[in-house]
Image (cartoon, rainbow, N blue to C red):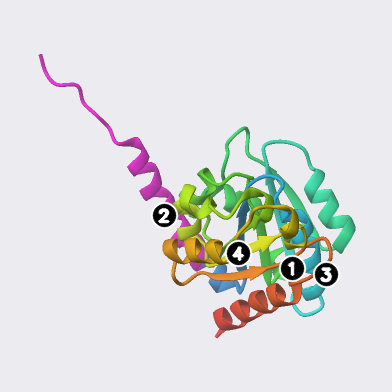
Amino acid sequence: MDPVKVIEIKKSVFADNDRDADLLRKELKERGVYLLNLMSSPGSGKTTTLIQLINRIKDKVRVAVMEADIDSDVDAVKIKEATGIQSIQLHTGGMCHLDAEMTRQGLGGLDLKETDLVILENVGNLVCPAEFDTGSCRNMMILSVPEGEDKPLKYPLMFSVCDLVVINKIDVLPYFDFDMDKCRQYIKMRNPAAEVIPICAKSGEGIDALAGWVLRELENWKH
């Protein structure tokens, strides 16, 4: 009997997506549009952080947001009402991530002629979104204090692919067994080049540093 044929679907899917992502990055560069991919687990404070960030930079750059969720338009509505910028909702049809083609479809719903920076708020989890290149210029993720400092050890790929790790909810540090020094150490183990910015999205503490990082990255990319 002939041996069963095995097809490596996962490898093929990733390779195809990587090519699509590189092409999308090239197209966005030609149009002068910077794409920032934001990832985290649910409840980490992504949307609240975005509102604080956008309200600090929207007078300097033209910002648009794509909110990705399995269902609902809660976050897109919240962003639009709180900031007044372009905000659209992407439904993934049950998928736990966005890939480059899905991102491209979402970008088609924005007026890119009036946009310098697009922020993609990816689906909330620490596994699938890290596996798929969306075509973004940079990856950013939020880790909240209640999640614990050990997450870089448990979800290595997420921290390996991110250029910036934002540690949110530092206002509750006194109430949780969270070691900031250990967290920084674990992040560096996964990604020595990753920058770390502690914030409190609720109060706005640290948001100026985050805004500065985004504006510097955008300026460096332009030149």
Badge 4 element: helix
In the rendered image, the residue lying farthest to the left is: 1
Q: Which residue is mark 1?
A: 63
Question: Residue placed at 10% from the left, 13% from the top?
Answer: 1
Question: Residue placed at 51% from the left, 60% from the top?
Answer: 24
Question: Residue placed at 61% from the left, 51% from the top?
Answer: 148
Q: Which residue is mark 2?
A: 18
Disc 3 versus disc 2: nearer the observer:
3
Badge 2 element: helix
Residue 189 spot, x, y in % from top left: 42, 63
Q: Say what amino acid the circle numbered 3 marks.
A: Asn
First in sequence, mark 4 or 1: give its number.
1
Residue 165 spot, x, y in % from top left: 58, 64
Asked if marks 4 and 1 touch (Cβ < 8 Å), the reply is: no
Badge 3 element: helix
First in sequence, mark 3 or 2: give its number.
2
Q: Is residue 47 visible?
A: yes
Which label is found at residue 180?
4
Residue 208 spot, x, y in % from top left: 75, 76
Q: Relative to 181, is 157 above or below?
A: above
Disc 4 versus disc 3: nearer the observer:
4
Circle 4 crowding by C-alpha within 10 Å: few under 14, some 14–19, many from 20: some
Residue 206 spot, x, y in % from top left: 74, 72
Q: Which residues are magenta?
A: 1-26
